[in-house]
């Protein structure tokens, strides 16, 4: 063993161990992709048909809004009456990373959809869970599962929506939030 070895938990030591000096370790990250302004405005104004039209004309669904949200996150928050077909078109158009992007409160689009959608059906829940199965088990910044958002934020929860939300993670019903 070399007695002069530095512990590898030091970042400089890890770089030096593979022959990289601090000067060479500068990483140039590309600037974040900015969400198309027309898409952002349409989503924030809950104009789902305009969002879908812009997407059909070639607008890019990737990128982040000025507030750090994805198009899918904005639509789940603002477009409270998305049909299942509209939701599926959005899911098809948005990159997979949008399903895993958390907002400032640690919520995924599934949390937001279950907590804010005014005409939620089991088909909405199924579409979101099929698109991002792991999201059903994800907790937000308050320790709430998507199921918690469904039960806490909706005025009435029908059996179909509850069953669809419970199916991927039945233990969520026994998981306390913080």
Image: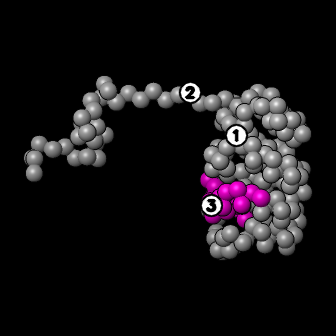
Which residue is at 86% across, 35% downward? 53
N-terminal of the two: label 2 or label 3? 2
Q: Which residue is mark 3?
A: 134
Q: Is residue 75 left or right of residue 118?
A: left
Q: Secondary structure at mark 3?
A: helix
Asked if the residue at tag 2 contacts the one at tag 1, i.e. Cβ–Cβ closer than 8 Å, the answer is no
Q: Quadrant of the C terminus?
A: bottom right
Picture disc at residue 114: none
Residue 144: quarter of image: bottom right
Q: Could you classify mark 1 by the number of other residues whose Cα lies within 10 Å: few (under 14), some (14-19), or many (20 or more)?
A: many
| Residue 101 visible (yes or no) | no
Q: Secondary structure at mark 2?
A: loop
Q: Is residue 86 left or right of residue 63?
A: right
Residue closer to the observer: 154 or 50: 50
Which residue is at 80% across, 51% downward? 88
Q: Could you classify mark 2 by the number of other residues whose Cα lies within 10 Å: few (under 14), some (14-19), or many (20 or more)?
A: few
Q: Is residue 41 left or right of residue 129?
A: right
Q: Secondary structure at mark 1?
A: loop
Q: Which residue is mark 2?
A: 31
Residue 59: quarter of image: top right
Q: How many marks?
A: 3
C-alpha separation, residue under disc 1 versus residue under disc 3: 18 Å
Residue closer to the observer: 104 or 65: 65
Q: Which residue is mark 1?
A: 70
Residue segment shown in magenta? 127-148
């Amino acid at each position: 063993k070399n007695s002069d070895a530095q512990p590898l938990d030091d970042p400089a030591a890890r770089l030096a161990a593979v022959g990289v000096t601090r000067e060479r370790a500068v990483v140039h990250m590309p600037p974040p992709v900015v969400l198309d302004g027309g898409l952002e405005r349409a989503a924030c104004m809950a104009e789902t048909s305009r969002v879908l039209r812009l997407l059909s004309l070639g607008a890019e669904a990737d990128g982040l809004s000025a507030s750090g949200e994805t198009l899918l996150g904005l639509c789940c928050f603002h477009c409270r009456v998305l049909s299942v077909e509209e939701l599926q078109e959005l899911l098809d158009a948005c990159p997979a990373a949008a399903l895993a992007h958390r907002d400032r409160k640690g919520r995924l689009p599934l949390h937001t959809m279950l907590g804010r959608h005014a005409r939620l059906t089991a088909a909405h829940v199924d579409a979101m869970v099929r698109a991002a199965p792991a999201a059903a088990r994800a907790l937000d910044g308050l320790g709430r599962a998507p199921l918690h958002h469904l039960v806490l934020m909706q005025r009435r929860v029908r059996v179909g929506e509850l069953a669809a939300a419970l199916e991927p993670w039945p233990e969520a019903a026994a998981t306390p939030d913080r």
